[in-house]
Image (cartoon, helix red, strand yellow):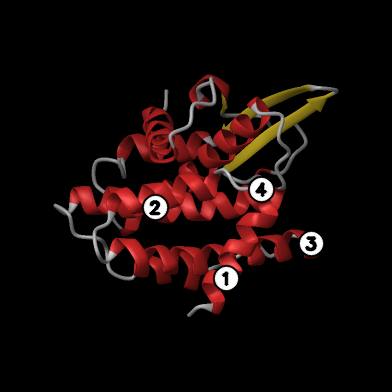
Amino acid sequence: MAPQVSVIQHHLERIYAIDPGCRAEQFLVTDPLPANTPMQNVPEEQLLVCEEGAEIGLGLYLSAGLLGRLRKDDPLTRLHDGNFADLCLVIEGVSHFLCVAWHASRDRPVTCLELELQAEIDKYILALLLAARQGHGRAPRGLHGRLFGQFHLAPDLDHATRQRYHRANGYAATYCAHLERRHLRSGGVRALLRELRRFYRLQQHAKLGHIKRRRQSH
């Protein structure tokens, strides 16, 4: 139904050396709307979570419109300005799904801030990987600025949600700039993977502390 979902999960699992034991495409939902929900208020991507005691239920909502655009113009085949935003939406959804599933399999809690932070990092890393592969090893110029500098939020978000997104974006911008300086410019792929895998497994307070130290050192 949506091969991009499977491919993106595969890439993230390889980058972080993780196996959540489930596939996001098996939990894909395309129309979770109640009959009285205005279409304009519905996002094109959303992780659906239902907790009942010790059990957790997941669903990954990707709109039919988004999936249709991906079929017509697949960023995994050719990434460009016209499909960049759609790629980011799918990466964000798969990243959220994978992060919740991985933490749940280890009985570890995960916060909304941690989910958003990881998704921002995943968008940067995967967009960089895809663009580099399609460009014969050349990373796209201005990727960091596009993801973290051109940052816009929906106007109807509440204050707490806006603050969380801004914090996640700021922390991710600092961390990805550090990755670029420390690893990407020198081509140190093995060191980059070690860093990403270690970071993924940290608790939230340790992740934020790690990023703050990177911020202070530059």
User: Would you name the residue on which mark 1 appears?
Assistant: 213
Report which residue position mark 2 lands on.
Answer: 125
Rounded to the nearest angstrom, the CA distance separating label 2 from label 3 is: 27 Å
What kind of element bears circle 1? helix
Considering only order in the chain, which callout, 1 or 3, is on the residue closer to the N terminus? 3
- Rounded to the nearest angstrom, the CA distance separating label 3 from label 1 is 25 Å
Q: Position of residue 61 (x, y in %)?
A: 59, 33
Residue 54 shows in this picture: yes
User: In the rendered structure, which amino acid carries the disc numbered 4?
Assistant: Gln
Which residue shows up at 62% across the image and 40% down it?
46
Q: Earlier in the sequence, mark 1 or mark 2?
A: 2
Mark in front: 2 vs 4: 4
Residue drawn at x 24%, y 41% is 77
In the rendered image, which quarter is residue 9 located in?
A: top left
Work out whether mark 2 precedes mark 3 in sequence or the reverse, and give the earlier one: 2
Left or right, 46 with reference to 3: right
Residue 83: where, in percent of width, then height?
Answer: 36, 51
State the residue at coordinates (71%, 35%).
Answer: 108
For label 3, the SS is helix
Q: Which residue is mark 4?
A: 203
Left or right, residue 164 beside residue 17: right
Q: CA distance from mark 2 to mark 4?
A: 20 Å
Mark 1: give few (<14), some (14-19) or many (20+) Cα within 10 Å.
Answer: few
Mark 3 is surrounded, within 10 Å at the Cα level, by few (under 14), some (14 to 19) or many (20 or more) other residues, namely few
